[in-house]
Image (cartoon, rainbow, N blue to C red):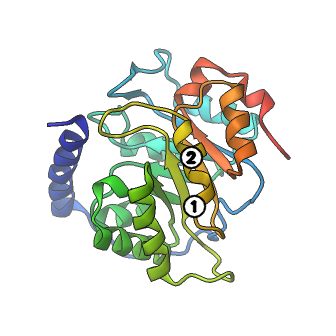
Amino acid sequence: MSILSEIVENKLQEIQTLKQSFEYSGKFLKTRKPNFLTNPEFQLIAEIKPKSPSAGIIRKAFDPVSLVKEFEKKSASGISVLTDEKYFGGSLELFKSIRENTVLPILRKDFILEEIQLFESKKIGADLVLLIVKILSKEKLLQLTKLSLSLELQPVIEFNNLIELEIVTQTLRDLNLNSTSELKPILAVNNRNLETFETSIETCLHLETIIPSGFLKFALSGIKDLDDLEKIKNSGYNGVLIGQGLVTNPELFEEFYVK
């Protein structure tokens, strides 16, 4: 069994537990204006990620609130928070502590498989949610994207290859969004293959020219230095999500912004 299959299997078990305890009243709908990550200029989503299956513990002196304040000072456009506990060291409690300490848009980064996780995301104050094409059927991706938009949760749709991009393109057609839609999905190329965990920024550089127009395009994972960052910026992306790279190379903060 691959690590991804193991993560998904564990997440399905967690969802069954969630269904037994979760209460959703709907009273927290539409509490924030849905204009989260819409700026066409180059943006950074800075990630709070305690650990990962591939890298292990990422930052030994882990103070998430201090990290967020540091990200704010460096003009991050949004914060990504891992909420998977077993494999990434995150939690809902971690997310809530970040929510209480920033007004920046927050992406809940987890393995979203069922609708109840979107309601949970709304309840804890998420602005954006990650939807991973690799772990969803075409039907489920469309269903979750529609529900995300109806809940005013901006979906970040992640894909890694041409086959997955074709699924995304069909989903966008089925959504029938237009230029006046206030909230649209963000299209995010993950440079990491979730099956092998191999990472290459050539992935996003190759796919950029065939990503549907009219949507923000972000690159995720594997951005290690300024050279990587410049290549991504110059290829036409609207932003990046960086976690481990900011820990190992903080100067990325100082150089890449286009105001």
Is label 1 in contact with label 2 (beta carbons under 8 Å)?
no
Image quadrant in which you'd find residue 230:
top right
Secondary structure at badge 2 equals helix
Estimate the x, y position of residue 236 in percent, counting from the top left: 71, 51
Question: What residue did someone put label 1 on?
Answer: 211
The secondary element bearing badge 1 is classed as: loop
Q: Amino acid at mark 2?
A: His
Residue 132 seen anywhere in this rendered image of the structure = no
Residue found at x 65% / y 50% = 104
Q: Looking at the image, which residue sits at the far right?
A: 259
Determine which of the numbered discs, if any, sits on residue 16 in the image: none
Is residue 135 or residue 36 the one in the foreground? 135
* Residue occupying image coordinates x 67% and y 41%: 232
Q: Quadrant of the N terminus?
A: top left
- Residue at horizontal 35%, vertical 33%? 88
The residue pinned by badge 2 equals 206
Q: Nearer the viewer, mark 1 or mark 2?
A: 2
Residue 7 on image: x %, y %: 23, 41
